[in-house]
Image (spheres, grey):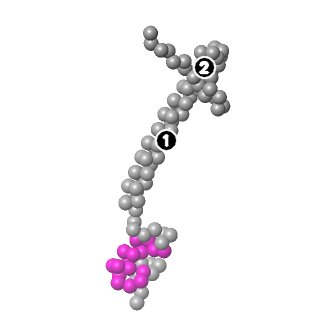
Amino acid sequence: MPSQEKQTIEIGGELYEVESLSADARASIAVLRDLDEKIGGFRKEAYYLEVSRKSFENQLSRQLPSRSLKNGKSEQNDDKQDKNGGKPTDNGTKSG
């Protein structure tokens, strides 16, 4: 004769036999299990979204100019300096 293991659940640090609980309690357990499954699915989806976002962020980083405004000069100013052989001025002509 196969042994039938009684299903238990831990709630608030206490262990209970599921079949000994009221029908309402068992229904609540079923809802909680369903919610836990959905939460797990959302966590998995959030992880995939974060990985995808990071990938697009990395792709964007490769497409940006080598210097940002925060670093002092924009790439456009560097181009003017290189083409004109001097420091760029406000109107784009070289000085010096």
Which circle's residue, 1 or 2, is located before the other in the chain? 2
Height in image: 53 above or below 9? Answer: below
Q: Amino acid at mark 1?
A: Ala
Q: Residue furthest bottom?
A: 96
Give the position of the C terminus as an image quadrant. Answer: bottom left
Q: Secondary structure at mark 1?
A: helix
In this orientation, which residue lies closer to the viewer: 61 or 45?
Answer: 45
Q: Amino acid at mark 2?
A: Glu
The spot of residue 49 in percent (x, y) is 45, 43
Q: Residue at image x 47%, y 43%?
A: 47
Tell me, yes or no, if residue 31 can be seen here: no
Q: Quadrant of residue 48?
A: top left
Residue at image mark 1: 46
Q: Is residue 85 left or right of residue 40?
A: left
SS at badge 2: strand
The magenta stretch spans which residues?
Answer: 72-88
User: Who's the residue at 64% across and 32% down the image?
Assistant: 13
* 79 part of magenta stretch: yes
Count of numbered circles on the image: 2
Horizontal side of 30 relative to 93 (left or right) equals: right
Whether residue 18 sits left or right of residue 63 in the image: it is: right
Q: Which residue is mark 2?
A: 17
Alpha carbon distance from label 1 to label 2: 34 Å
The quarter of the picture where residue 24 lies is top right
